[in-house]
Amino acid sequence: MSVEYDLVIIGSTIAGIDAALQAARCKARVALIQQNCHPRFPWYQAFAQIGRTLQRVDRVNQLQLFDAPLKTSALDLAQVNRWVSAIAQSQQEFYSPEKLAASGIEVISGSGEFRRKPQAGFLVNGRLFRARAYLIAADYTLTIPEIPGLETVHYLTPDTIPNAIPRSLIIVGDDPVAVELAQLYARLGSQVTMVIRQPHLLAIADSEVAFYVQAQLEAEGIRVISAIHISEVIQTQKKKRIHAGTLSIEADEILFATGWQPQTEGLNLDAVNIREPIKLNEKLQTRNSHVYWCGHPVNAIAQSQAYLAVNNALFAPIRKFNHHDVIQSIETMPELAWIGLTEVQAVRKYRKDVLVLRQSFSSLLKLQVTGDITGLCKIIVHRDGRIIGAHIVGQNASELISTIAVAIRRNTRIQDFNQMPALSDNLTALFRNAAQDWYAWNLNRKSVLQDLQESYFAWQRSLPFDLTKIRRKK
């Protein structure tokens, strides 16, 4: 029996909308079912801009460039929230159903479920949508751990927009969002304590650059405590307290950022023989090869999944997803961004053929002027110059890592960066400096070539030379 659509996308998340636009550009007939989803605007990114501004004011005061210190009054959170709402509204306009419809996408409001009988398809508002392939781009919800006493305590989540900045705050979780929120609240005046399950922050990142970020947070007064298990949460008269092992920590508010889970309720996945927990193969297919999934709590990963899933769904399912090919970033200050293998992963895979090139941000005059010298550019290469990983913490890390991502995609080797045209104080000079370090390492490794070069220069020095007898060429 014929079908109506080439692809039906379930969930109007950012990844789902990007997938629909990509399918429409391929001239496929595509339907986008909203499924009670909407593009999320991370309000804390706007708040973080305020934190960065306050940090720069502090920097100016430290330099004592004015006769009197610059003063900042208390934040008007009501005004800030209006500003954030305006930004969110502007962002939503880019994803409006009218604009999507103008791109050739049929947008269906409401939610539905898979049906097996009398015909297989996805039923929405009494209408059955049948397609060659389906792509689930479901939203994610926060996972809250089961802790005794938590049900009686009011707590915050990453989606909670504050009406007031708490004087003290406990953040439970080592999710990247938790790290971003910890620095944000600290810069807005809170005394922040992070309770994490790992030995250090950002266990998903390379440990060396992760320690850079943790050191920066601790330098700003954020306390980081490693505790595997929280035994109890208590609401006192004015405070909230958690017990973790032998520790008892008290604060005005508690915020949980402990992981995410996909929203699968109501989809009736059993009708298409999909069982939970959802398992995907390398092509992003579920147990049912006609149903793809691109849901991930990190937008960058979800959007990369969507791009690959659409290609596999519309054409031949031959592409394989590798999360090492995706740029990931943490919007702290300084920023953290990475792509490819960590140092541990690279050594495990290539052993002695791995070379780690490190460049400090403090070597650039431009950053010394602005005071943003805290940073490290760490490029992991194979001995032949292939870039197998890059981890950058510092100003504009997310922009810098994009250059490396293009280089990896085009099989550009580190030595090629030595010929890259760049201003001497531009941040991309870090890559050229790394290429020069690779060249020096490679030269030292090749003792025969090194001996030949030394012999050549020794021979040149032994030749007769008289500066006064040199004539200018016509």
Image (tube, grey):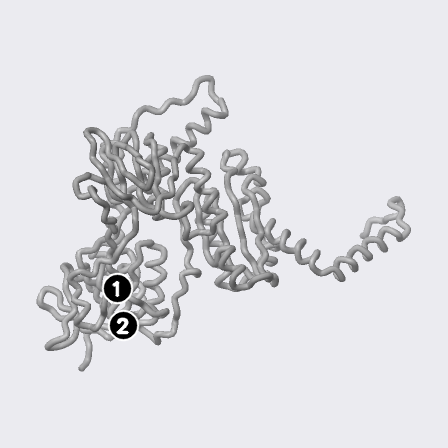
Q: Which mark is residue 287?
A: 2
Does 4 sit left or right of 434 as displayed? left
Picture quadrant of residue 335: top left
Residue sitting at x 16%, y 75%: 120
Can residue 311 be seen in the rendering of this structure? no
The extreme left residue here reads 126
- The mark closer to the camera, 1 or 2, is 1
Residue 278 drawn above or below residue 315: above
Q: Position of residue 283 (x, y in %)?
A: 35, 70
Q: How many marks?
A: 2
Residue sitting at x 42%, y 55%: 327
Mark 1 vs mark 2: which is more N-terminal? 1
Q: Which mark is residue 391?
A: none
Q: CA distance from mark 1 to mark 2?
A: 11 Å
Residue 291 drawn above or below residue 163: below
Q: Which mark is residue 277?
A: 1
Can residue 216 be seen in the rendering of this structure? yes
The extreme bottom residue here reads 1
Q: Position of residue 106 (x, y in %)?
A: 20, 64
Residue 395 drawn above or below residue 75: below
Are dots 1 and 2 in contact, CB under 8 Å?
no
Residue sitting at x 61%, y 63%: 384
Residue sitting at x 59%, y 62%: 353
Amino acid type of disc 1?
Pro
Between 457 and 392, the residue placed more toward the observer is: 392
Label 1 residue SS: loop
Give the quadrant of the N terminus. Answer: bottom left
